């Protein structure tokens, strides 16, 4: 995992921007449901296939990320993008 300090800094930064309301509630981001277990860690569920992933702002358990991050350390899958939107407050429980 490259540059651990940098990624921790980023998490802390988005954490303060996120509403407390976003934790422990299902939030719809496009075709995904983001469920924040903690301010740093989420479960992301695909509405269609009900496949559950463990996702943070910097990692994801999906295959797309595992292969993509091998080629590009800054690779971001759509699950991470959805989680980041929730963390940044771009998508909230209320706006669903
Ligand atoms: Zn993913």
Image (cartoon, helix red, strand yellow):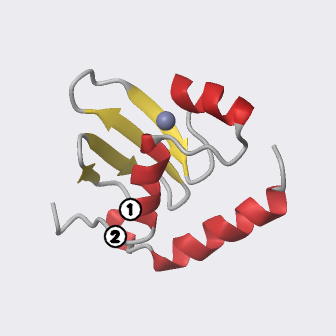
As drawn, the label of residue 90 is 2
State the residue at coordinates (72%, 63%): 8
State the residue at coordinates (54%, 23%): 63
Q: Which residue is mark 1?
A: 86
Residue 24 image offset from top left, x and y in percent: 35, 54
State the residue at coordinates (45%, 65%): 87
Residue 60 image offset from top left, x and y in percent: 56, 37
The reply, left or right, for residue 78 in relation to residue 69 is left
Q: Is mark 1 within 8 Å of ligand 1?
A: no
Judge whether 74 appears above or below 84 on screen. Answer: above
Secondary structure at numbered mark 2: loop
Residue 3 image offset from top left, x and y in percent: 84, 56
Q: Quadrant of the C terminus?
A: bottom left
Q: Quadrant of the N terminus?
A: top right
Q: Give the residue furthest to the front.
A: 71
Count neighbours of disc 1 (C-alpha within 10 A) and say few if under 14, some if 14 to 19, many if 20 or more: many
Secondary structure at numbered mark 1: helix
**Residue 3 in view here:** yes
Q: Quadrant of residue 45?
A: top left
Count neighbours of disc 2 (C-alpha within 10 A) and say few if under 14, some if 14 to 19, many if 20 or more: few
Judge whether 68 appears above or below 81 on screen. Answer: above
The reply, left or right, for residue 3 in relation to residue 80 is right
| Total marks placed | 2
The reply, left or right, for residue 45 in relation to residue 48 is right
Judge whether 40 appears above or below 50 on screen. Answer: below
Q: Is mark 2 within 8 Å of ligand 1?
A: no
Residue 81 image offset from top left, x and y in percent: 45, 51
């Amino acid at each position: 995992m490259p540059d651990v300090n940098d990624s921790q800094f980023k998490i802390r930064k988005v954490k303060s921007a996120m509403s407390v309301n976003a934790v422990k509630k299902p939030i719809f981001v496009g075709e995904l449901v983001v469920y924040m277990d903690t301010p740093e860690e989420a479960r992301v569920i695909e509405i269609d296939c009900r496949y559950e992933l463990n996702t943070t702002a910097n990692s994801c358990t999906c295959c797309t990320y595992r292969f993509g991050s091998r080629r590009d350390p800054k690779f971001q899958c759509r699950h991470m993008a959805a989680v980041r939107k929730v963390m940044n407050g771009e998508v909230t429980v209320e706006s669903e």
